[in-house]
Image (spheres, rainbow, N blue to C red):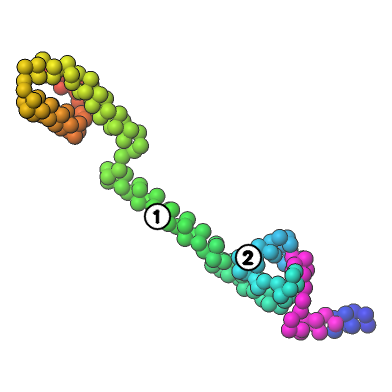
């Protein structure tokens, strides 16, 4: 008789429209931590409490069931969907980079650094000898000729910097064969 009475009381409680409960009860029913219940509210999975710490059991339970069903189907909440989209975009970006590397449209960081270092070395060597080369030429020139000669020399140096740098192997082959 006690068991029948308990079942009847439980049935009446479940039929209530607004069954108040705490996050502790929701956590126990769902088998999760109390903090996770609060996270679900922040994520918009379950409705927020009506009063401080008092939730509508039926509304929350229905929303949680729907959430778990979507997770099982692979949809998830908005944050999960956003994570999947970001992951997919990163995968697509990586694939695009691989294709660009295969097409030789991109160079590695090491190659770029080497190219820049080579250009800096060429500029340094051209500029280091600049005054030694130009001093004897400019000694007996007037102002206009000096300006023209300096402009010509600057353009020659800059023109050499804009040319592709030959590999060391190619340079050594040219030296030995020529």
Q: Nearer the viewer, residue 61 or 68?
A: 61
**Is 162 situated above or below 64?**
above
Estimate how packed mark 2 is, as few (under 14), some (14 to 19) or many (20 or more) residues with alpha carbons within 10 Å.
few
Q: Identify which residue is drawn at 74% across, 81% down.
A: 18
Q: x, y (%) of residue 8?
A: 85, 84
Mark 1 or 2: the one toward you: 2
Q: Which residue is mark 2?
A: 42
Q: Which residue is mark 1?
A: 92
Circle 2 SS class: helix
**Is 11 situated above or below 160?**
below
Q: Identify which residue is drawn at 43% across, 53% down.
A: 90
**Is 113 situated above or below 95?**
above
Work out which quarter of the rendered image holds the C terminus and state it.
top left
Work out which quarter of the rendered image holds the N terminus and state it.
bottom right
Q: Is residue 128 left or right of residue 1?
A: left
Identify the image quadrant of residue 43: bottom right
Magenta region, main secondary structure:
helix
Identify the image quadrant of residue 25: bottom right
Q: Would residue 43 be counted in the magenta stretch?
A: no
Q: Earlier in the sequence, mark 1 or mark 2?
A: 2
Circle 1 SS class: helix
Q: Is residue 86 left or right of residue 53?
A: left
Please provide the residue range marked out in magenta: 9-27
């Amino acid at each position: 008789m006690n068991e029948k009475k308990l079942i009847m009381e439980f049935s009446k409680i479940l039929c209530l429209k607004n069954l108040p409960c705490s996050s502790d009860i929701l956590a126990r029913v769902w088998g999760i931590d109390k903090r996770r219940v609060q996270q679900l509210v922040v994520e918009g999975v379950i409705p927020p409490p009506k009063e401080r710490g008092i939730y509508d059991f039926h509304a929350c339970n229905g929303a949680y069931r729907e959430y778990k069903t979507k997770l099982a189907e692979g949809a998830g909440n908005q944050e999960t969907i956003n994570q999947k989209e970001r992951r997919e975009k990163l995968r697509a970006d990586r694939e695009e980079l691989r294709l660009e590397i295969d097409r030789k449209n991109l160079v590695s960081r090491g190659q770029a650094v080497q190219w820049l270092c080579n250009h800096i070395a060429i500029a340094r060597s051209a500029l280091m000898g600049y005054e030694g080369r130009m001093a004897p030429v400019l000694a007996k020139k007037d102002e206009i000729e000096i300006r023209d000669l300096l402009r010509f020399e600057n353009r020659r140096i800059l023109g050499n910097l804009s040319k592709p740098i030959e590999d060391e192997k190619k340079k050594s082959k040219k030296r030995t064969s020529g």
